[in-house]
Image (cartoon, rainbow, N blue to C red):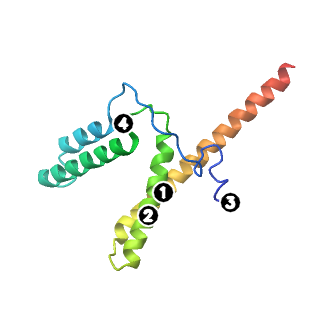
Amino acid sequence: MTDDHSAEGFGLSDPEPEPNKNLNKFVWDEVIEELLSRNSGGDKETRDLISRDMRQRDQFGFRKYGTRLQSGNGRNSFIDAYQELLDYIVYLKQCEIEGDKHQYLYETAIVMITMMKKEIEKRNTTKKSSNYDKISNTKLER
Protein backbone atom coordinates (compact mmCIF):
# COMPACT_ATOMS: atom_id res chain seq x y z
CA MET A 1 0.00 0.00 0.00
CA THR A 2 1.48 3.35 -1.00
CA ASP A 3 1.27 6.45 1.14
CA ASP A 4 -1.18 8.03 -1.31
CA HIS A 5 -3.63 5.18 -0.88
CA SER A 6 -3.26 4.57 2.85
CA ALA A 7 -5.68 7.42 3.52
CA GLU A 8 -8.19 6.39 0.89
CA GLY A 9 -11.50 8.03 1.58
CA PHE A 10 -9.99 10.77 3.73
CA GLY A 11 -8.06 12.76 1.11
CA LEU A 12 -4.71 13.16 2.87
CA SER A 13 -3.04 13.95 -0.43
CA ASP A 14 -5.89 16.19 -1.56
CA PRO A 15 -6.01 19.80 -0.39
CA GLU A 16 -8.86 20.67 1.92
CA PRO A 17 -11.35 23.23 0.59
CA GLU A 18 -11.19 26.84 1.70
CA PRO A 19 -13.04 27.22 5.02
CA ASN A 20 -16.63 28.42 4.89
CA LYS A 21 -17.73 31.26 7.15
CA ASN A 22 -20.62 30.42 9.46
CA LEU A 23 -22.21 31.44 12.75
CA ASN A 24 -20.34 28.91 14.95
CA LYS A 25 -17.96 30.01 17.70
CA PHE A 26 -14.38 30.81 16.82
CA VAL A 27 -12.14 27.88 17.78
CA TRP A 28 -9.15 30.01 18.81
CA ASP A 29 -11.34 31.85 21.34
CA GLU A 30 -12.37 28.51 22.86
CA VAL A 31 -8.78 27.27 23.09
CA ILE A 32 -7.46 30.53 24.56
CA GLU A 33 -10.25 30.61 27.13
CA GLU A 34 -9.46 27.02 28.18
CA LEU A 35 -5.72 27.71 28.33
CA LEU A 36 -6.13 30.77 30.52
CA SER A 37 -8.56 29.03 32.89
CA ARG A 38 -6.16 26.14 33.60
CA ASN A 39 -4.10 25.74 36.72
CA SER A 40 -1.75 23.42 34.85
CA GLY A 41 0.33 23.90 31.74
CA GLY A 42 2.86 26.31 33.15
CA ASP A 43 2.53 29.44 35.21
CA LYS A 44 0.04 32.20 34.45
CA GLU A 45 2.68 34.39 32.81
CA THR A 46 3.61 31.59 30.40
CA ARG A 47 -0.04 30.89 29.59
CA ASP A 48 -0.54 34.62 28.91
CA LEU A 49 2.41 34.59 26.51
CA ILE A 50 1.06 31.50 24.76
CA SER A 51 -2.38 33.12 24.44
CA ARG A 52 -0.75 36.09 22.70
CA ASP A 53 0.97 33.69 20.28
CA MET A 54 -2.40 32.01 19.68
CA ARG A 55 -4.04 35.34 18.91
CA GLN A 56 -1.29 36.07 16.40
CA ARG A 57 -1.88 32.69 14.70
CA ASP A 58 -5.61 33.45 14.68
CA GLN A 59 -4.93 36.75 12.89
CA PHE A 60 -2.54 35.03 10.48
CA GLY A 61 -5.30 32.54 9.60
CA PHE A 62 -7.77 35.37 9.13
CA ARG A 63 -5.42 37.14 6.71
CA LYS A 64 -4.73 33.90 4.85
CA TYR A 65 -8.29 32.54 4.62
CA GLY A 66 -10.45 35.65 5.06
CA THR A 67 -12.17 34.12 8.08
CA ARG A 68 -11.27 32.97 11.56
CA LEU A 69 -11.24 29.25 12.31
CA GLN A 70 -14.72 27.94 13.11
CA SER A 71 -16.16 24.45 13.50
CA GLY A 72 -18.43 23.28 10.71
CA ASN A 73 -16.41 25.17 8.12
CA GLY A 74 -16.49 22.47 5.44
CA ARG A 75 -13.03 21.13 6.19
CA ASN A 76 -12.13 17.84 7.84
CA SER A 77 -10.56 19.09 11.06
CA PHE A 78 -9.13 15.67 11.95
CA ILE A 79 -7.28 15.49 8.63
CA ASP A 80 -6.10 19.09 9.09
CA ALA A 81 -4.74 18.13 12.52
CA TYR A 82 -3.07 15.00 11.13
CA GLN A 83 -1.40 16.94 8.32
CA GLU A 84 -0.21 19.65 10.73
CA LEU A 85 1.23 17.00 13.06
CA LEU A 86 3.10 15.42 10.15
CA ASP A 87 4.65 18.83 9.47
CA TYR A 88 5.41 19.31 13.19
CA ILE A 89 7.35 16.01 13.25
CA VAL A 90 9.41 17.01 10.23
CA TYR A 91 10.23 20.41 11.75
CA LEU A 92 11.37 18.77 14.99
CA LYS A 93 13.59 16.39 13.02
CA GLN A 94 14.99 19.40 11.17
CA CYS A 95 15.75 20.99 14.56
CA GLU A 96 17.60 17.82 15.60
CA ILE A 97 19.63 17.72 12.38
CA GLU A 98 20.55 21.37 12.90
CA GLY A 99 21.72 20.64 16.47
CA ASP A 100 18.69 21.90 18.40
CA LYS A 101 17.49 18.65 19.96
CA HIS A 102 13.97 18.21 21.29
CA GLN A 103 13.81 14.40 21.58
CA TYR A 104 10.95 14.35 24.10
CA LEU A 105 8.74 16.50 21.86
CA TYR A 106 9.66 14.41 18.82
CA GLU A 107 8.91 11.11 20.57
CA THR A 108 5.61 12.47 21.92
CA ALA A 109 4.64 13.57 18.40
CA ILE A 110 5.46 10.10 17.03
CA VAL A 111 3.10 8.57 19.61
CA MET A 112 0.40 11.10 18.72
CA ILE A 113 0.74 10.55 14.96
CA THR A 114 0.57 6.79 15.48
CA MET A 115 -2.67 7.16 17.44
CA MET A 116 -4.13 9.46 14.78
CA LYS A 117 -3.15 7.09 11.95
CA LYS A 118 -4.86 4.20 13.73
CA GLU A 119 -8.00 6.34 14.02
CA ILE A 120 -7.84 7.20 10.31
CA GLU A 121 -7.47 3.53 9.38
CA LYS A 122 -10.38 2.67 11.69
CA ARG A 123 -12.50 5.32 9.98
CA ASN A 124 -11.43 4.02 6.55
CA THR A 125 -12.44 0.49 7.54
CA THR A 126 -15.78 1.72 8.89
CA LYS A 127 -16.41 3.78 5.76
CA LYS A 128 -15.54 0.88 3.44
CA SER A 129 -17.71 -1.49 5.48
CA SER A 130 -20.59 1.00 5.44
CA ASN A 131 -20.29 1.43 1.66
CA TYR A 132 -20.17 -2.34 1.21
CA ASP A 133 -23.30 -2.77 3.34
CA LYS A 134 -25.10 -0.17 1.24
CA ILE A 135 -24.07 -1.98 -1.97
CA SER A 136 -25.04 -5.38 -0.51
CA ASN A 137 -28.42 -4.11 0.64
CA THR A 138 -29.10 -2.59 -2.76
CA LYS A 139 -28.40 -5.91 -4.45
CA LEU A 140 -30.67 -7.74 -2.04
CA GLU A 141 -33.54 -5.35 -2.67
CA ARG A 142 -33.60 -6.13 -6.40
Residue 142, compared with residue 71, is above or below; it is above
Image point (80%, 29%), residue name: 136
Name above or below for residue 30 compared with residue 115. above
Q: Which residue is mark 4?
A: 67
Mark 2 or mark 4: whose residue is earlier in sequence: 4
- Disc nearest the viewer among 2 and 4: 4
| Residue type for callout 3 | Thr
Residue 137 is situated, as x and y percent measured from the top left of the image, at 78, 25
Mark positioned earlier in the residue sequence (4 or 1): 4
Q: Quadrant of residue 89?
A: bottom left
- The CA span between labels 2 and 1 is 9 Å
User: Residue lying furthest right in this view?
Assistant: 142
Question: Which numbered dot is residue 2?
Answer: 3
Of pointers 2 and 1, the one earlier in the residue sequence: 2
Task: Work out how far the residue at label 3 is from the one at label 1, CA to CA, in angstroms.
Answer: 18 Å
Badge 1, how many Cα within 10 Å: few under 14, some, many 20+? some
Q: Which residue is mark 1?
A: 113
Labels in figure, total: 4
Kind of element beneath mark 2: helix
Q: Residue furthest top?
A: 141
- Hey, what amino acid is under mark 1? Ile
Q: Nearer the viewer, mark 3 or mark 1?
A: 3
Q: CA distance from mark 4 to mark 3?
A: 35 Å
Q: Residue at x 46, y 62 (%)?
A: 110
Tag 2 residue: 89
